[in-house]
Image: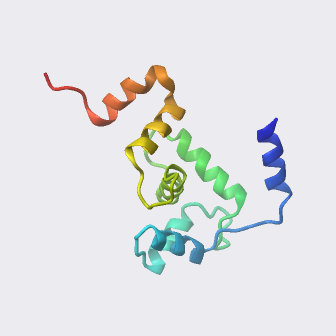
Amino acid sequence: SELERKLSDVRSRPVQHIRPQDTAAQLRSLGKRATKREVQNMMWEVDEKLDGVIDWDEFHLNFERNIRDTSGLEPAKFYHMVQFLIYDHDNNGMVSIDETMNMLYARVGREQMETTITKLFGGDDE
């Protein structure tokens, strides 16, 4: 399938890492000034090997843990940054209503869309 081909392509590339300076640069591009300590703590949440960088396996594990987290206790700062970048389709540093609705539709489907919106934003107070 197309997904398997893309995954195979990614896996065949040389090992790549996300470094603290990469994370800091991305945060700056989003208008968030973070201290070196804040960036280190954000990366530490994901850096299972404690080697100061995030590799694909660590990135993937963090993403899976956060997707499956029902307790709200999974460290999620890095995950939230990545989610924001995924949803900001036009790369303008903001997630628009349209981008939010597209994400919700993709995540929950048409049948659950209204229920999810009501849960997130409240319903009519009649």
Residue that appears at 76% across and 40% down: 3
- Considering only vertical position in the picture, is 9 above or below 28? above
Residue 28 drawn at (x, y percent): 46, 73
Colouring used for the render: rainbow
Seen from the viewer's position, the closer of residues 45 and 86 is 86
Q: Which part of the image, by quadrant, shows the N terminus?
A: top right
Residue 82 drawn at (x, y percent): 54, 56
Q: Which part of the image, by quadrant, shows the C terminus?
A: top left
Residue 23 drawn at (x, y percent): 55, 70
- Considering only vertical position in the picture, is 35 above or below 115? below
Residue that appears at 71% across and 55% down: 57
Residue that appears at 46% across and 44% down: 99
| Residue 86 relative to residue 121: left or right | right
Residue 118 drawn at (x, y percent): 31, 29
Seen from the viewer's position, the closer of residues 122 and 55 is 122
Residue that appears at 51% across and 41% down: 69
Q: How many marks?
A: 0
- Considering only vertical position in the picture, is 30 above or below 64? below
Residue projecting furthest to the right: 12
Residue 10 sits in quarter: bottom right
Residue projecting furthest to the left: 126
